[in-house]
Amino acid sequence: MKSASPAPQPRFGPSAAPAVLAFAGLVATLMQTLVVPMAPLWPELLDAPPAATSWLVTATLLAGAVSNVLLGRLGDIFGRRRLMVIALWVLTLGSLAGGLTHNVWVLVAVRVLQGLSMGVVPLGMAMLREILPPARYVRGVALISALIGVGGALGFGASAVVGTYLDWHWLFWGSAMLGALTLAGIRLAVPADRRALPGTRDRVDVPGAGLLVAGLVALLTAVTNARGWGWTSTATLGTLAGAGVVLALWAGRQWRTRQPLVNLRMAVHRPVLFTNLASTMVGIGMYPMLLAVPQLVQVPAGTGHGIGSTLLASGLVIVPGGVVSLFMPPLAARISGRWGPRAVMLTGAGIMASAYAYILVSHSSLVEVTVQTALLHVGLAFCFGAAPAMLSGHVPSKDLGQVNGVNNLVRTLGTATSAALTATVLAALPIAGGPGAGRYPSGTAFTLVFGLGLACCLLVPVLAALAGRRAEPPG
């Protein structure tokens, strides 16, 4: 690779860039949870069947999974800042369209455009490697990771507030404002891409991209719709089988081609493989509590396991956890500097496990579930920040975009699978009699999903240990 020409400097100094990139990650992850607390209300608001409105969540997960890999790789080739700006323009214009429609399928298309913004997370983490000196890189990644947790929490809170007090279109108008604000911040604070000399750019594996998109769409469609179709139905099993065939074809192509979309030889390298597996468990362990607690809050207190509060409270109990996680990056950076990023991952997994152990024992008040979700967010902030730092010690800088994209992809697949399993269990085991019978999940259902979260958190330290210690990146 030939040397690159110097990049133009931004209006503000380099110290502002990590904060702007972290805010971009916050905005992107806010989109993922923006409509979740209002899920029961969408059929009435849009005059559409629940099967159609469920795509308001599914579409964003699909788009986010695809963009994590595609934008990461395209950023490595064409410029990370450039691809981030494009993704945020798509988010902004799409959100404006969402604020002007009442049609469910137009809104689903808008949610696809919002989901594409998830690609800014791996792009931002890769850009930090270029912007910051090594001593500040871990802290910068930790800041982005902390704000990812804040974004998801704010999505719950914003949806609950809008659903209670405002017209639902404000969810999309507000998203457009956030997108425009982020674009302004990038223009002012983030350095332009270094311009590669002629002949230095790789080619984009377009057929590989098509196979990846088709395979992920089929996989996540099956996982997120299994509750309605039935896990053993022909539709679910057939779609999963089709996804497996397409993804196998994609993997074969990536292994053979000289310029793959995803370098699978690097992906099966032991540190990368087990870091990604640990991230998958973090993704699966994240959603049982985040999806179940809002329902638990609304279950009548007379059932013996519910709190009996409002829609507004069910969203707001998630928000403090996101705020608390903002203060974790300095501590995570200190642990990483002394013992390495793997120790940060182990610490985060332990905190997440303690949150699940606590909620399995007691969840009788809003204060308790607020503390429990706060512990979960603290653990997530540690784990989200540790994974990119672990990977950066084993891969070249030029491949960080796609490697971080794959890491975000596997975590997204974990959250999608977890969301589907959680929803299925909560729906399959309703209260049999008494207050809330047939309308709310039973105590057994909540115990099962919280047990799933605890089991996944306990697997994370095992997988992180198998990833081995940090090494210097090869190039």
Image: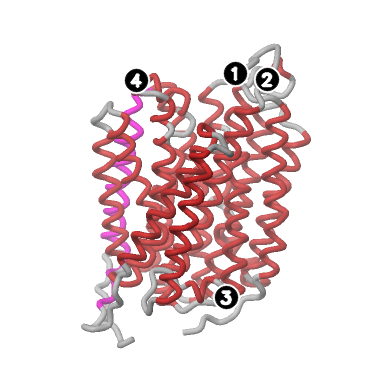
Please give the name of the residue rendered at 54% of the width and 37% of the height, measured from the top-left corner: 233
Tell me the kind of residue under disc 4. Answer: Asp
Q: CA distance from mark 4 to mark 1?
A: 21 Å
What residue sits right under mark 4 in the picture? Answer: 47
Q: Residue 215 appears at what percent x and percent y?
A: 43, 55
Q: Residue furthest right?
A: 361
What residue sits right under mark 2 in the picture? Answer: 431
Q: CA distance from mark 3 to mark 2?
A: 47 Å
Helix, strand or loop at label 1? It is: loop
Pick the front one: 21 or 443:
443
Q: Main secondary structure of the magenta part?
A: helix
Q: Residue furthest bottom?
A: 2
What residue sits right under mark 1 in the picture? Answer: 439
Please give the name of the residue rendered at 23% of the width and 31% of the height, measured from the top-left corner: 100
Tell me the kind of residue under disc 1. Answer: Arg
Please tell me which of labels 1 and 2 falls first in the chain: 2
Q: Is residue 34 left or right of residue 342?
A: left
Tell me the kind of residue under disc 2. Answer: Ile
Please tell me which of labels 3 and 1 falls first in the chain: 3
Please give the name of the residue rendered at 49% of the width and 58% of the height, measured from the top-left corner: 408
Mark 1: give few (<14), some (14-19) or many (20+) Cα within 10 Å: few
Please tell me which of labels 4 and 2 falls first in the chain: 4
What residue sits right under mark 3 in the picture? Answer: 269
Mark 2: give few (<14), some (14-19) or many (20+) Cα within 10 Å: many
Pick the front one: 263 or 118:
263
Q: Are circles 3 and 2 on residues that touch, CB within 8 Å?
A: no
Please tell me which of labels 4 and 1 falls first in the chain: 4
Was residue 262 drawn as part of the magenta stretch in this picture?
A: no
Q: Residue 162 appears at what percent x and percent y?
A: 40, 27
Q: Which residues are magenta?
A: 166-195
Q: Is residue 137 left or right of residue 298?
A: left
- Using the image, determine if residue 117 lies above or below residue 203: above
